[in-house]
Amino acid sequence: MTEIIKSAIVPYSAHDMRQLVNNVPAYPEFLKWCEHGYILDSFASGYEAGMLVKIKGIRVDFSTVNTLIDDVDFLAVAMTLSKGPFRRLQGYWRFIHLSELGSKVQLELSYEIKSKMIGRMFAKGFDQVASQLVSDFVRRAGDVYA
């Protein structure tokens, strides 16, 4: 199982950063490995979203159920695998308010790929993609909010 924890401090609000993460249909605009992002269903506490990704020449479709959390000190998105090539995939985006300074963005992600058919190439590629996610969203925030 692979576990990744990444964070960054940004000059944008926690609300703005969570809005970027929740805008799954826009992912192909700035995540070069994401061919299609889509919302499958919306419900009171969140939504189910999917992505068609191409990593190391392997095309994979997967979806997660994303629960929105609003706390006094932070906003969050808790992700749980719905379907896809993973034995397990769980993640947690946390957006911590830092007054006028902006916010701290943190991603905790753990996953395990179940299929040997998909192979080590996809797994290594997904490791690289996952470890870059926070940086990709920080760059996107600069493009959208600057």
Image (cartoon, helix red, strand yellow):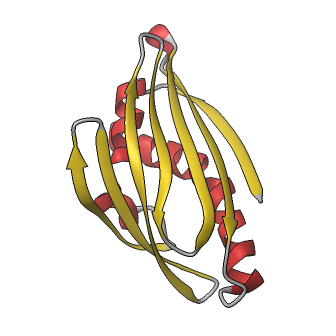
Tell me residue 83's x, y (percent): 46, 68
Q: Is residue 44 left or right of residue 77?
A: left
Tell me residue 66's x, y (percent): 40, 46
Query: Which image quadrant for residue 8?
Result: top right
Tell me residue 57's x, y (percent): 59, 89
Residue 47 in view in this figure? yes
The residue depicted at 67 percent of the width and 59 percent of the height is 111
Query: Which image quadrant for residue 87?
Result: bottom right
Name above or below for residue 144 compared with residue 39: above
Q: Nearer the viewer, residue 89 or 31?
A: 89
Tell me residue 101's x, y (percent): 50, 14
Q: What quarter of the picture does the C terminus occupy?
A: top left
Report the number of numbered marks.
Answer: 0
Q: What quarter of the picture does the N terminus occupy?
A: bottom right
Name above or below for residue 104 compared with residue 124: above
Residue 146 in view in this figure? no
Q: Nearer the viewer, residue 127 or 144?
A: 127
The residue depicted at 35 percent of the width and 46 percent of the height is 22
